[in-house]
Amino acid sequence: MTIITVSLLGITAVLMATALKNTGGEFGTYLTAAAGCLLFFAGVQKMGMVVESIQRIEEMIQISPVYLKMLLKMAGITCVAGFSSGICRDAGYGGIGNQIEIFGKLSILAVSMPVVLSLLETVQEFF
């Protein structure tokens, strides 16, 4: 999908959901959630190209694949948390959306801890 297609799909879903809010509020929420899922999976397809590019970079610069995998995990956590919290906010449950974002941030912190520890060990060897 191109950005034009994705944008038109999003705008169409929002306009339809707005029209459905007057007749039945829950149907608008379902429509926006379905459109959000469709857009999310379109973005996941683009991640395949990103992964291929990162693998080529990994081969070129001889970096440990562990660091690039962590980077991809962090990007994935960010995307899923943002997507999920956005759906919760659109449905009127901003508190749950905030909790998802906090959990996402803590998950990124947990994934990045081995890199921080490795860096501190390296610095400690110099002193």
Image (tube, grey):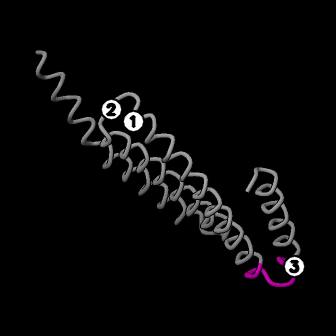
Question: Is the residue marked by circle 1 packed among few (<14), some (14-19), or many (20+) residues within 10 Å?
Answer: some
Residue 23 lies in magenta, yes or no? yes
Magenta stretch: give its range: 20-27
Image point (65%, 60%), residue name: 42
Q: Nearer the viewer, residue 59 or 31?
A: 59
Q: Secondary structure at mark 2?
A: loop
Residue 22: give its label: 3
The quarter in which the C terminus is drawn is top left
Callout 3 amino acid: Asn
Of tags 3 and 2, which is closer to the observer?
2
Q: Is residue 94 left or right of residue 21?
A: left
Callout 1 amino acid: Glu
Verify CB contact (< 8 Å) between mark 1 and mark 2. yes
What residue is pinned by disc 1? 58
Where residue 118 appears, x then y in whole percent?
A: 21, 34
First in sequence: mark 1 or mark 2? 1
Q: CA distance from mark 1 to mark 3?
A: 52 Å
Image point (46%, 40%), residue name: 54
First in sequence: mark 1 or mark 3? 3
Where residue 101 appears, x then y in whole percent?
A: 49, 55
Q: CA distance from mark 1 to mark 2?
A: 6 Å
Q: Secondary structure at mark 1?
A: helix
Q: Main secondary structure of the magenta part?
A: helix
Q: Is residue 29 above or below residue 54?
A: below
Where residue 32 appears, x then y in whole percent?
A: 72, 70
Question: Is the residue marked by circle 2 packed among few (<14), some (14-19), or many (20+) residues within 10 Å?
Answer: few
Q: Nearer the viewer, residue 14 or 91?
A: 14
Q: Quadrant of residue 104?
A: bottom left
Callout 2 amino acid: Ile
Residue 111 lies in magenta, yes or no? no
What residue is pinned by disc 2? 63
The quarter in which the N terminus is drawn is bottom right
